[in-house]
Amino acid sequence: MKTHLWNSFINVVKREVVPALGCTEPVSVALAAAIARDKLNGKPEKITALVSPNLMKNGMGVGVPGTGMVGLPIAAAVGALAGDAKAKLEVLKHITPEDVAEAKALIDADCVSVGVAGVSNILYAKVTVNSGAEFVSVTIADSHTHVVAIEENGITTYIAAPATTDANSKSDNPFTEATAEDIYDFALHAPLEDIRFIEQSYALNDALSAEGLTGKYGLQIGATFQRNVDRGVLSGGLLTDVLRRTSAASDARMDGAMKPAMSNSGSGNQGIAATMPVVVVADFLNVDKEKTIRALMLSHLMAIYIKSHQNKLSALCGATTASMGAVAGMTWLLGGDFDKISNAICSMIGDIAGIICDGAKASCAMKVSSSAGAAVKAALMALDGIRVTGNEGIVADDVDTSIRNLSALANGSMTQTDVQILDIMVRK
């Protein structure tokens, strides 16, 4: 076992699995606006945001928590007026109805504008907030909370240090050396107290699921499953519970519920997809707390490992890759070893590779549900010794090569798919 990687694994999970209130793309705009506001002497009067095409795609149609509205303009406005700049991805947790009304008034007065920036960064937002003759610009890039520059009245007052490229930086990216089996070994054998923190993902995402099951949010995917179980149209059981509880959490998150999700790799939906199927299986089997914690760590770290091979945002739906992490945790809880976990991930790649991301919105709950269902199917197949073989499509004989093949698709030809998707969205 590569125990020398274990501390790095823990650091990566603590960095990538964090609470997030609302979809992380508009939230990054709100955060930039809040940081800019904190450096102004007066009240925000005008707000301008320039964002990368990928961020625009993921911010156009998603609900912004506490506002009852969708899109980047309201995120920028309410972030500038009332965002908590120190709360990072929970920047909007303290907003009030009065703040929202004031933000809407700014938008109605044409004092808020959002455009696409001509940048190569996949994730980029530059927000400028004006108050009288003063203005502050804050630029976030490459990750949702990474401030790379601040300008105050035209003078650059902060520039982030460039990312290190020397050998020491490998400690921040253990995946240059790690394999899927190393992640499996870590999750099963690391000291429990070192990984117990992952239990918070259970608490946050399960609470979000319960909120979604009230039927007040989005397309009500989870509540629809529940209603049809109550009507007798659907039976209960493991598959239905996975679909119901997982999609309900996404319903609530994507429609602006004022409850945080535990995110994964910068996405609340990815955090939900990596958490809730594992939670449901653990509850269904009534396993002990330690086994649940280890299954959640296996799921979240495997999801991060798969995502680490891909661009932060792409045309490939992130819920699919996060659910490949979930299938690892589920298969292990159901009695599978590493070989069966590998087979389950390979089957999922053969099943749902290529599901497109056409922006963040309420219907993401359907893709989360589809991915969770695919995970259940792949896990049960693997337990019976069945998998998509290395002779089929992009799937290889081993899991690590299959993951790299999937990532090559996401980072290669699907970049043009992303351009086409955004073009269709903005022309509707």
Image (cartoon, rainbow, N blue to C red):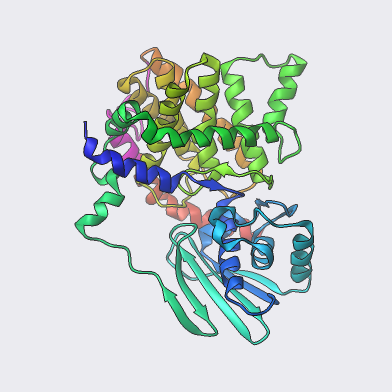
Say above or below: 230 vs 222.
above
Q: Residue at x 45, y 72 (%)?
A: 149
User: Which quadrant of the view contains residue 233?
Assistant: top right
Left or right side of 114 for 97: right
x then y, percent, for residue 370: 56, 31
Q: Tell which of 425 and 234 is nearer to you.
A: 234
Query: What's the residue at 65%, 51% (across, down)?
Result: 62
Side (left or right) of 62 relative to 371? right
Residue 388 appears anywhere in the view: no
Query: In terms of image quadrants, where is residue 190?
Result: top left
Is 215 situated above or below 29? above
Q: Extreme bottom residue here?
A: 133
Question: Of 408 and 168, which appears nearest the observer?
Answer: 168
- As displayed, is residue 16 above or below residue 138? above
Q: Which residues are magenta?
A: 386-405
Principal SS element in the magenta part?
loop
Q: Residue at x 71, y 23 (%)?
A: 226
Q: Please, is residue 230 above or below residue 254 in the view?
A: above
Q: As rendered, which of 222 and 67 lies closer to the eye?
A: 67
**Quadrant showing the N terminus:** top left
* Magenta run includes residue 397: yes
Q: Residue at image x 60%, y 57%?
A: 91
Task: Decide whether residue 89 is among the magenta residues.
Answer: no
Image coordinates of residue 219 in percent, x first then y, are 71, 38
